[in-house]
């Protein structure tokens, strides 16, 4: 969690709110969760019908917005006004909003929201407390799963089960939340059937396999590992299993393979500059942090471990050829006249595994 979001969470607990908030970014699930928490913390449930107004920007004119923001709280310390899709405000309403932000009311919390896909409004970000809700990477998704299961569902998810969920479902939180709800319900039923009613609910690999259908050894991470070590037999056998999993696709598989091969190429360049395998471990983590939205396909720790192990296996010419193969596969997936997606990925992973590597020379 970023420092900014920790500040927001602290406001929920202390009830020391800013006059105005601006929520934007691509992850609407995280955004809506923060909206719910802000509303629950800022407005007394007993008077919420009087003191919580939620409107859409396109429906507001200047007079209506002025009236909403000038209304004092009723039988409460504060009121909250939320404007969804604030970028859709008409010119007169936007001018009214800008005037209000210069001198906001002390007993009103104003929440401004931009939907996913909308460009962040720099002026609003400067006038209000702004928070960006970006999609979580694989590492943060794994932490989110453990936290959400414990805080919202009262269950503990084993690290192995977390890995299967990330590998089989991906990083889309709305989908993960739905799958977690089903998996926890299954685990609760298993506990109760075993006579453990009232005891701890533990989600393990077996529960994830039973509900989601993904098994250990059949995740996208396992396919990436097989390609990194050029194990053609294992990689070819995994393609069908991986593409059959929830939210999996040939496109995301090629993205993850591209990230992996680019990372290995970068690591090889660092090795040529004198970096040790031990130093590479930390440098790969820094690279992922700087890359931001790079799709890794699994928790960062697992990816970095595989990349460090693979760096000395691959030659620079093989890596150059691998990137060309990945570009060709991406083009093939966009061409509806070619073979099926599974055939494209099958051909790709076999070609990657067949590239000449450096094992023989280094062994000598």
Image: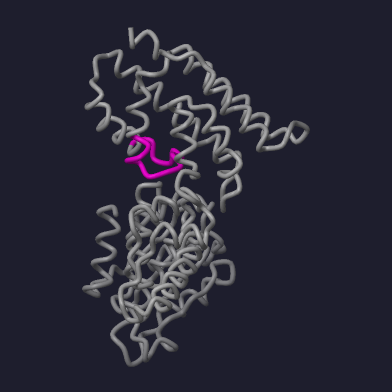
Q: Residue at x 28, y 71 (%)?
A: 12
Q: Is residue 309 left or right of residue 64?
A: left
Q: Quadrant of the C terminus?
A: top left
Foreground pick, 134 / 125: 134
Q: How many marks?
A: 0
Residue sitting at 35 percent across and 51 percent down?
140
Residue 288 occupies quadrant: top left
The residue positioned 37% from the left and 91% from the top of the image is 46
Q: Nearer the viewer, residue 248 or 63?
A: 248
Q: Is residue 125 above or below residue 323?
A: below
Which residues are drawn in magenta? 290-304
Which percent across, then down, holds residue 209? 49, 57
Relative to 244, say whether 340 is above or below. Answer: above
Residue 331 x, y percent position in the rendering: 65, 29
Residue 253 percent across, percent down from the top left: 54, 38
Q: Pick the residue in front: 72 or 187.
A: 187
């Amino acid at each position: 969690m970023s420092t900014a979001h920790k500040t927001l969470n602290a406001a929920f607990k202390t009830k020391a709110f800013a006059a105005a908030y601006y929520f934007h970014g691509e992850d609407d699930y995280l955004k809506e969760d923060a909206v719910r928490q802000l509303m629950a913390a800022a407005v007394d449930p007993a008077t919420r019908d009087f003191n919580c107004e939620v409107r859409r920007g396109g429906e507001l004119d200047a007079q209506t917005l002025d009236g909403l923001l000038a209304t004092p709280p009723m039988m409460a310390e504060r009121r909250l006004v939320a404007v969804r899709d604030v970028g859709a405000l008409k010119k007169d309403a936007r001018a009214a909003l800008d005037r209000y932000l210069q001198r906001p009311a002390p007993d009103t919390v104003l929440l401004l929201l931009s939907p996913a896909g909308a460009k962040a409004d720099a002026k609003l970000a400067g006038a209000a407390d702004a928070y960006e809700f970006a999609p979580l990477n694989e590492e943060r998704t794994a932490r989110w799963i453990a936290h959400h299961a414990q805080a919202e569902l009262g269950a503990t998810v084993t690290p192995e089960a977390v890995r299967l969920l990330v590998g089989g479902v991906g990083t889309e939180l709305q989908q993960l939340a739905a799958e977690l709800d089903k998996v926890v319900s299954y685990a609760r039923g298993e506990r109760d059937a075993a006579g453990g009613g009232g005891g701890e609910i533990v989600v393990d690999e077996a529960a994830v396999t039973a509900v989601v259908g993904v098994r250990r050894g059949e995740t996208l991470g396992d396919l990436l590992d097989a390609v990194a070590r050029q194990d053609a037999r294992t990689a070819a056998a995994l393609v069908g299993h991986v593409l059959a999993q929830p939210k999996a696709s040939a496109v995301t598989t090629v993205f993850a393979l591209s990230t992996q091969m680019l990372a290995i190429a970068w690591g090889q360049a660092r090795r040529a500059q004198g970096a040790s395998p031990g130093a590479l471990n930390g440098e790969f983590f820094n690279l992922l942090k700087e890359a931001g939205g790079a799709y890794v396909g699994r928790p960062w720790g697992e990816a970095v471990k595989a990349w460090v192990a693979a760096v000395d296996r691959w030659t620079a010419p093989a890596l150059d050829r691998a990137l060309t193969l990945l570009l060709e596969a991406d083009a093939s997936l966009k061409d509806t006249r070619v073979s099926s997606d599974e055939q494209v990925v099958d051909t790709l992973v076999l070609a990657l595994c067949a590239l000449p590597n450096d094992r023989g020379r280094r062994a000598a």
